[in-house]
Image (tube, grey):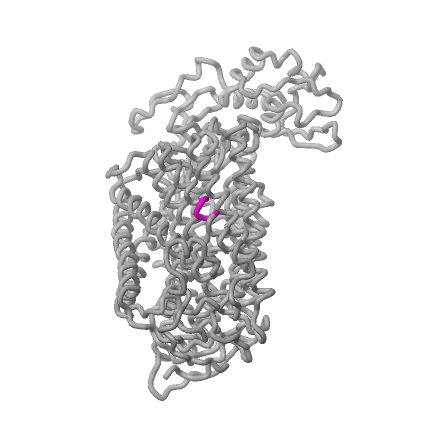
Amino acid sequence: MSSTHAQSGTGTNYLNCTKGMSSWLHTLDHKRIGIMYLFTVLSFFLLGGFFALLIRWHLFSPDHHLLSAGNYNKAFTYHGAIMVFLVIIPAIPAAMGNFVLPMMIGAKDVAFPRLNLFSYYIFVLGAIIALCSLFFGGADTGWTFYTPYSIHAGTTVIFVVLGAFVAGFSSILTGLNFIVTLHKLRAPGMTWSRLPLFCWALYATSIIQVLATPVLAITLLLLIFEQVFKIGIFDPKLGGDAVLFQHFFWFYSHPAVYIMILPSMGIISEVIPVFTRKPIFGYKAIAYSSFGIALIAFIVWGHHLFVSGQSEMANFVFSLLTMFVAVPTGIKVFSWVATMYKGSIRFNAPFLYALGFLELFTIGGMTGVFLATLAIDVHLTDTYFVIAHFHYVMVGGTLMGLMAGLHYWFPKMSGKMYCETSALISFVLIITGFNVTFFPQFILGAQGMPRRYWSYLPEFTLLNQISTVGSWFLGAGFLFSAYYFIQALRKGEQAPDNPWDSKSLEWWSPSPPPVENFLKDPVVTTWTYEYRSAKV
Amino acid sequence: MIFSEALAADSLPIQGSEIAARWDHLYLFLFWLSVFFFVLVVGGMIYFAIKFRHQKKHQPTYITHNHLLELIWSVIPTIILMVIFVWGYSVYHAMITPPDDAYEVRVIGKQWFWQFQYDDGRMTVDKVFVPVNKPVKFIMSSEDVVHSFFVPNFRVKQDVVPGMYTSVWFEATVPGRHQIYCAEYCGTRHSLMLADLYVLEPEQWIAWKAGKKLTGISEAGGGNPPSSGGDLVDQGRKVTTVKGCVACHSDDGSPKVGPTYKGLFGAKVELTNGSTVIADENYIRESIENPQAKIVKGFGPVMPSFKGLINEEEMNAVIAYIKSVK
C-alpha cells in the first residue's frame, strides 16, 4: 500500500470549505453529518449521564430521599431511554460510522447522501418528541415500557414511545444506506476479503437495524393504539396479553444489544492492529463471528422472559440458544488478545481504551453466561446483578469502543491532536470509576436487591455508597475528557495525515479530509492489516 | 472449597430452601469459571502488553492466524457452555416442578401489596405463613400490572401476571422470617411492595392452623378468622351460587347447559375443534373470563363472559371449589 503522506493541513477541507450554520444544516457530506450526529449524541450522553448521577446520588443512603418515588422512577426511565435510544444505538454507527465508513472503503460519500441527512433529521425529531414528554409530567415506565403498566401510566408515555418510534426510522435508513454503500461504492481493489473489520461489523449491524427495528416500530405503534383507542392487545383488562408485549419488545431490543456492541467490536478490531503493529489475528473468524452474532441475535429474545410465565420448553430452547452467543464472542476476545502476541505495542489513548474494553467486556460477557443459565437467572433476573451485567457490556463494551474510536479518529476528524497525558488521566478515572460503580452491584444483585428500587433495605447501604462514590469518578472522567477534547479543538497541535501510521484507507487522506475525501482516487492493492514493522 | 463456601456465605443470601444449596453450587462453579477466564484473558492481555511493549530495535512478528488455536478456543468453550446449560436446566426443572402434595396458598399481587389466601378461608396481607420442611406451592395472579414474587433466601422468583396464573414452589428449611420483594417494576411504590414470609416450626404451624396467636412473631396474628365465610371451597361454592353459575353447571356429574364441575379439575377436556386441553387453573380462568375461547365438545357457545364481574379472590375460591368436586 503506497499512501501519499502529503501534509496538507492548510488547504480547503470539509470543515472550512463552506461557512455558517446553514451550510451545516444543508450539508450532504457524510463527514459533516457524522460530526452532527456526534455532537447530538454527546449532548444526549451528557443529559443521560446527569440522570445517572442523580440516581446514584439518591441511592447514597436507603432513606436519603433526595427524590420522591415518582421522580426517582422518572429519572431511571429517562436515563435508560436516553442512553439506549439516543446514545448507545446511534453513537457508533451513525456518528463514527458515517464519518469513517465511506473513507475506509475509498468512497466519496455514502450511497444516498440525501437520505443520510434525512436520517439525521428524523433522529433529532424523534429525540425532541421523546424529550417533550418531560414538559408534560414525564414518563415513569422504565425504558422497557412493560404493559399493562405503560397503558395506564398516562399520556406522557406516548411521547417517549412515539419518539423512539420516529428515531427508529433513522436507524433503519442508516442501516440501509451502509449496506448499499458497502456493496456499491468500494474503491477498486477493495475486495470483500480486504474490507476493514469495522466495515464488516457495521454491515452485520446494518442487517440487524434493517430487519429488527421495524418490529419495534410496530410494537410501539400497537402500544399507542391501545392507549388511545382502547383496543385490547397487551392489557388483559381489555382482552389482551401482557406478556405478548415483552415478546415483541425483546424481539427488537435483544438484537438491539448487538446493534450497540458489534460496531464497538469493529473499532477494537481496527485499533489493536495499529497500536500493536501486527495484522489482526484471525481476520476471517472475526468477520464471520460478527454475522454469527447477528444471526443468533434474532432467536434469543426469550431469555429476557425466563420468569415471565413462559413455558418450560421455551425456556429450555432460549437458554440453549443463548449459550451459543458466547462462542463467537469468545472467538473475538481471544483473537484480540492473540493479536498482541509478539507485537510492538504503544499505549496511546485508543489502545488504552481497547484494553479497557477487553477488561470490562470479559466481565460483562462472563456474567452474561450466568444469566443465560436457567436456574441462575431465576434468582438474578430483575436484580442489580442484571444492572451491573449490562452496564459492563454497554458501557464497558460500547462506550469504551466509542472512546477508543473517538481518540483514534479525532486527528482525522478535527485535524488536531489531543493531549495524551490528559487522555491517560481521564482513562484512569473512567476505568476506576466504572469498576467501583458497577462491581458492587453484582454483589447487591446476588444478595437479592431488586432493580428500580426507590428505597432499599439498610443491609444494602454500604455497597450502594461505594457504587455512588464510583459514579463521581466516572462522571469526572467523562467531563475531563470533554474538557481536553475542547481544548484540543481550540489550540491543539496540527495533526499529521497519519499520526498512528495506520494502513487503513481513511488515513491516506489529509487531516482533516477534503470534501471529496481523497486528493486522488485510491486504488487498493493489499489487505488492510499488512503491519510488518514497528512504527518509527 | 472452604474459601468458596465462605465466599458464598458472604455474598449470597442464606440457604433457606431445599433448592438454594443446589443453586449456590452452580453459581460458585460459574464464579470460578469466570475467574479462570478473566485471568486468562485479562492476565494474558496485561502480560503481552508489558512483554511486547514498544522497544527500540524490536520488530513485531507477522502472524495472521492459527487454525488449531482458533479451533481450540471455539470447541472448548462450546463444550463448557453445554455443560453449564444442562446443569442449569436440571436445577431449573427441579425449581419449577412441585410435588403433587404441595400445600397450596393463593397469592394476589396488587399495587402495592401482597395478599395471601389460605385453604381454610383466611386471608393475610403482606405476610404469609408456611410450614417448615413441607413443599409449598403459591398460585399467583395479579389484579393490575405485572409484579414479580421474589424470595432471595429460597432463590425463587416468578412474575405475577394479570390475566393468568403463574406459580412458584419451595420447601423451606429454615424457620423464621424471610424477605419477599416485588422484583418487576410496578409503579410509584414498587420498592415498598415488600412482604414477610414466616416459616413455622411444626408446633407453630399447628397453632396457626388452629387460629391461635403466634408467640415470637411480632403482632403477626392469624389473619381473618376462618369462621367468617367458611373455608376457601365454601367461599367458592357460594360464589357459584350468587353469580348464577349453578344454573348451567352441576356439581354431581349431571349434564346441564354447560359441563359439570365433577371430576373436571386435572381432567383432559375435548374441545369442539378436536383438540384437547388439561383443565388446570388457567383453563378454568379463561373459561370464566373468555368462555368462547375454548368450547367443550357437545356444548354450545352460549356462556357470557364474567370478565370484570368476578374479582381475583372470588376467582381463586371458585377454582378451589371446582378442584374439590371430585
Q: Quadrant of the N terminus of chain B?
A: bottom left
Q: Is residue B215 above or below residue A17?
A: above
Magenta: main secondary structure equals: helix
Q: Is residue A453 above or below residue B78?
A: above
User: Residue A487: where, in percent of width, then height?
Assistant: 26, 63
> How many discs appear?
0
Can residue B170 be seen here?
no
The magenta stretch is: A122-126
Answer whether residue A140 is magenta in the image.
no
User: Residue A190: where, in percent of width, then height?
Assistant: 57, 73
Q: Is residue B54 above or below residue A45?
A: below
Tell me which residue sits at (69%, 17%) in the image.
B302
Q: Is residue A222 above or below residue A316?
A: above
Tell me which residue sits at (54%, 27%) in the image.
A230
For this rendering, which residue is in front, B126 or A396? A396
For this rendering, which residue is in front, A203 or A100? A100
Q: Residue furthest bottom?
A: B57
Q: Quadrant of the C terminus of chain B?
A: top right
Can residue A126 be seen here?
yes
For this rendering, which residue is in front, A40 or B110? A40
User: Residue A227: where, in percent of width, then height?
Assistant: 50, 30
User: Residue A411: where, in percent of width, then height?
Assistant: 36, 69
Answer whether residue A125 is magenta in the image.
yes
